[in-house]
Image (cartoon, helix red, strand yellow):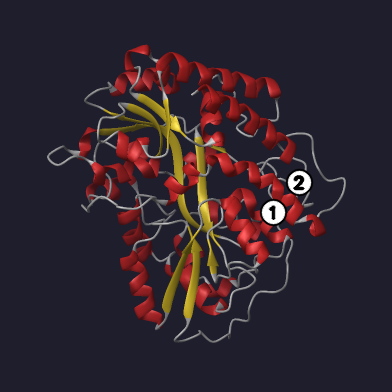
Amino acid sequence: MQRGPRARMSRRDFLLRSAGTAIALPSMSAILAACSKPGTTSSGGGGGATPTGIPLARPDAPVTLPMVGEPIPSDTPIETNATLKIYNWSDYMWKKVLKEFEDKFHCTIEWTTFNNMSEALQKLSSGQVQSDVFFPTVDVLGKLVTAELLQPLNHDLVPNLPGNMWPDFQNPFYDQGWRYTVPYTIYTTGIGFRNDQVDPAEVADKQYSILWDPKYQGKVGFYDDYREALAMALLKNGITDTNTASQSDIDIAKQDLLKLVQDNNARITINGTYVGIPESNFYVHQAWSGDMIGAQWYMPKGESPNLLSYWYPEDGRGVVGNDTITVPSSAQNPRLAHEFLNFFLDNKYATQNFSWNGYQPPLNSMDPDTLIKDGYVPKSLPEAVVRASDFENGYWLLELDPSVDQTWLSAWDEVKAGA
């Protein structure tokens, strides 16, 4: 499975480039002020509730989001000759698959992009952008529902979810009963590297600490994302609460990242994994599983994609996550939007889309042997294939109380200042 390099930034590029603007996320409390409930802010990163009044979702504390309105009736006709407005990250869906949807439903897709989730929330809440389909991360669902920016889904119109998706995503902890969301892609966060420069056995032995190894000085990097970077440093130090409110834990992670930057000349990047590793600008870099699979299409001419490797904890105790698809309350074509959700949960179209963006959908039909055998994933990257078991033990990066979020951001500011 081969294709050419992308010319534009991907969804992950945008997410990383927006790391500094994450400070704006707590400002959503001002946008949602009319919906907020006083006295609901917790002092910690786990449990409790945000100013929205909706509890902080955690795997051990599932949240059922309140119903805002009713789902559309099952007999709602599919809008024809419509313009379906999609609000998404750039280059996160294959245009070929989008064209197949247009042809099937006799519609036109209008694609609008956002640079980061803060921008998306602000534009949706102000009415600056109107869309039929929106792709939020799981940590902002409480804000979206409280602001009445999403409409509940009619499950009868999305049969591919129970038919094709992993059991864990039939009733996710962050949206019990999948009232508002369906899963789009899943990923893990580990370490990517060139195996002609770094011994896989050494990475397996040193794990996250491989980035701090002085022999790779100047050839190491980590993501320009405050949650991902600090979480990696927490895990390196045996701290498994990746949503911690502990100042001392966050300080430990901060100091380790400062040491990584100052002593090992580590670079903070937006594309160091899928572009930098293939080009040998980096030998080893923090990596999303999807970025490593996508890196095969950036290998220099004549070099095998099997020079790429990915490490993730064998016991599955690393960072995991997923992106979702929703229907905004302002959707002008809600039935067609439901068809769009169902279309991208179809085995055929979800697999085609994966073959282009490298980010895996949680399909029952996908297994490691199939993906490698069929050429979607290089044989050197079996660990980059996400497994259902990864979500049994993995750690999520989830919504934080605004005051806790600010503690993380302050630590990140110091890391960036020291770079």
For this rendering, which residue is in front, 166 or 301? 301
In this rendering, is residue 300 above or below 333?
above
Look at the numbered discs 2 and 1 and tell me whether their residues touch, using CB distance below 8 Å.
yes
Task: Tell me the residue that label 1 is attached to.
Answer: 142
Judged from the image, the secondary structure of the residue bearing numbered disc 1 is helix
User: Which of the 4 quarters of the picture holds residue 379?
Assistant: top left
Mark 2 vs 1, N-terminal side: 2
Relative side of 396 to 146, left or right: left
Q: Which residue appears at 28% of the width and 22% of the height?
A: 198
x, y percent for residue 278: 26, 36
In this rendering, is residue 222 above or below 110?
above
x, y percent for residue 252: 60, 18
Sort mark 2 into few (<14), some (14-19) or many (20+) by Cα contacts within 10 Å.
many
Relative side of 32 to 209, left or right: right
Under mark 1, the amino acid is Gly
In this rendering, is residue 280 above or below 166?
above
Judged from the image, the secondary structure of the residue bearing numbered disc 2 is loop
User: Which of the 4 quarters of the picture holds residue 189?
Assistant: top left
Residue at the extreme front:
417
* Distance from Cα at disc 2 to Cα at disc 1: 8 Å
